[in-house]
């Protein structure tokens, strides 16, 4: 099989993760057990996930000229990700993300996005030929919003399939939502986008702007639910031992992108993505916790 060609337009953050028994309340100091720095950022995590699953991945984004940028570039090189369209911004620092993870695997994250928010249309234009040749282009919301819109527009003009992982949670104009063939929010992001709490289906349905669009909502321990014009279905997760849920959404979106690019059906792609996310949460960290193709195939065979 030809390798799936995935273009990620997105963020890199250096994750600064502290592990502790329970998260501190405001004003409280708690003792941590372990502190780890590692490559993260939703865009980069999705790129690493896709690369480990066997895709040919190009990353379009910005880092600074600091030591964290070196770490980003080393990570992408090690993972075989094309870095030809990564800009080293002279004026902004590489993004960082202080993260807290408790003993149940739950997390709280602060992102200081720095260079990620300095992207220009010319960053995307430079990669026009690679985008035109891609199977799927995927964006998240940790870069400047105008570039999310621009990148999706460029991909649609070239007839390329698009995924928007609307994370972290925020509002998105209907005309930008319409540029995504697939939206992959979690429940918090779904609520922010739709303004509707409660049941997943009506909230997800309210985001559909085209007949051929699909929303796939990740619902944590329940798995993932697709909603489109033809109906809806919740697909269960794989039972795993949860250690750290950070990056699970990125593993899901990266896996989903690869599976769609390989021509899998919607439900096959969601099951593949559930397996990718399931393996990710069994390990600490974000990009380093992304599974290989062989691990995902082995987990799929257990069902
Ligand atoms: O989705 C997890 C990611 O969110 C982390 O890697 C962190 O950098 C933030 O972007």
Image: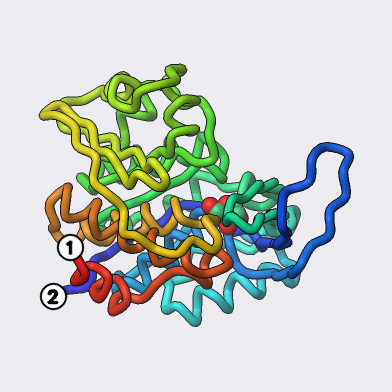
The answer to whether residue 136 shows anywhere in this view is yes
Q: Horizontal placement of 217 versus 283: left or right?
A: left
- Residue 31 found in image quarter: bottom right
Which residue is located at x 66 percent, y 55 percent? Answer: 102
| Looking at the image, residue 182 lies above or below residue 113 | above
**Residue 4 to residue 223: above or below:** below
Ligand 1 shows up in which quadrant of the image? Answer: bottom right
Task: State how far apart marks 2 and 1 are (Cα).
Answer: 8 Å
Residue at the location (58% across, 62% down)? 40
Q: How many labels were placed on the picture?
A: 2
Residue depicted at 74% across the width and 69% down the height? 34
Image disc number at residue 262: 1
Task: Say whether residue 39 is left or right of residue 228.
Answer: right
The quarter of the picture where the N terminus appears is bottom left
Q: Which mark is residue 133?
A: none
The furthest residue to the bottom: 78
Q: Which mark is residue 1?
A: 2
Q: How busy is the neighbourhood of tag 1: few (under 14 within 10 Å), some, or many (20 plus)? A: some
Disc 2 and disc 1 in contact, CB within 8 angstroms: yes
Residue 216, percent from left and from top: 30, 39
Q: Secondary structure at mark 1?
A: loop
Callout 2 environment at 10 Å: few (<14), some (14 to 19), or many (20+)?
A: few
Q: How was the colour assigned to the protein in this rendering?
A: rainbow
Residue 299: x percent and y percent? 27, 70
Rendered location of residue 272, percent (x, y): 25, 60
Residue 144 vertical position relative to residue 125 in the rendered view, above or below: above
Q: Going by the image, does 33 lie left or right of 55? A: right
Mark 2 or mark 1: which comes first in sequence?
2
Q: Can residue 133 be seen?
A: no
In percent of width and height, residue 35 lies at: 75, 68
């Amino acid at each position: 099989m030809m390798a799936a060609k995935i273009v990620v337009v997105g963020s890199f953050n250096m994750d600064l993760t502290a592990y502790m028994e329970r998260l501190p309340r405001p004003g409280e100091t708690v003792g941590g057990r372990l502190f780890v720095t590692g490559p993260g950022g939703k865009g980069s995590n999705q790129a690493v996930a896709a690369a480990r699953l066997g895709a040919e991945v190009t990353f379009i984004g910005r880092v600074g000229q600091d030591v964290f940028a070196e770490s980003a570039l080393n990570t992408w090189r090690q993972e075989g990700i094309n870095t030809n369209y990564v800009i080293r911004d002279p004026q902004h620092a590489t993004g960082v993300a202080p993260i807290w993870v408790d003993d149940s695997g739950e997390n709280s994250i602060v992102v200081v996005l720095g260079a990620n928010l300095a992207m220009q249309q010319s960053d995307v234009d430079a990669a026009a030929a690679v985008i035109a040749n891609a199977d799927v282009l995927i964006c998240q919301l940790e870069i400047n919003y105008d570039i999310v819109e621009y990148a999706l527009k460029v991909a649609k003009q070239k007839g390329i399939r698009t995924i928007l992982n609307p994370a972290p949670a925020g509002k998105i104009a209907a005309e930008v939502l319409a540029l995504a063939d697939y939206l992959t929010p979690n429940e918090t992001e779904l609520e922010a986008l739709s303004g509707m709490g409660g049941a997943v289906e009506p909230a997800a349905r309210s985001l559909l702007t085209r007949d051929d669009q699909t929303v796939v909502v990740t619902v944590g321990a329940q798995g993932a639910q697709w909603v489109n014009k033809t109906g809806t279905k919740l697909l269960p997760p794989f039972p795993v031992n949860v250690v750290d849920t950070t990056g699970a959404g990125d593993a899901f979106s990266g896996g989903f992108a690869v599976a769609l690019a390989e021509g899998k059906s919607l439900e096959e792609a969601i099951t593949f993505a559930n397996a990718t996310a399931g393996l990710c949460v069994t390990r600490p960290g974000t990009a380093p916790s992304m599974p290989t193709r062989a691990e995902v195939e082995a987990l799929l065979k257990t069902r």
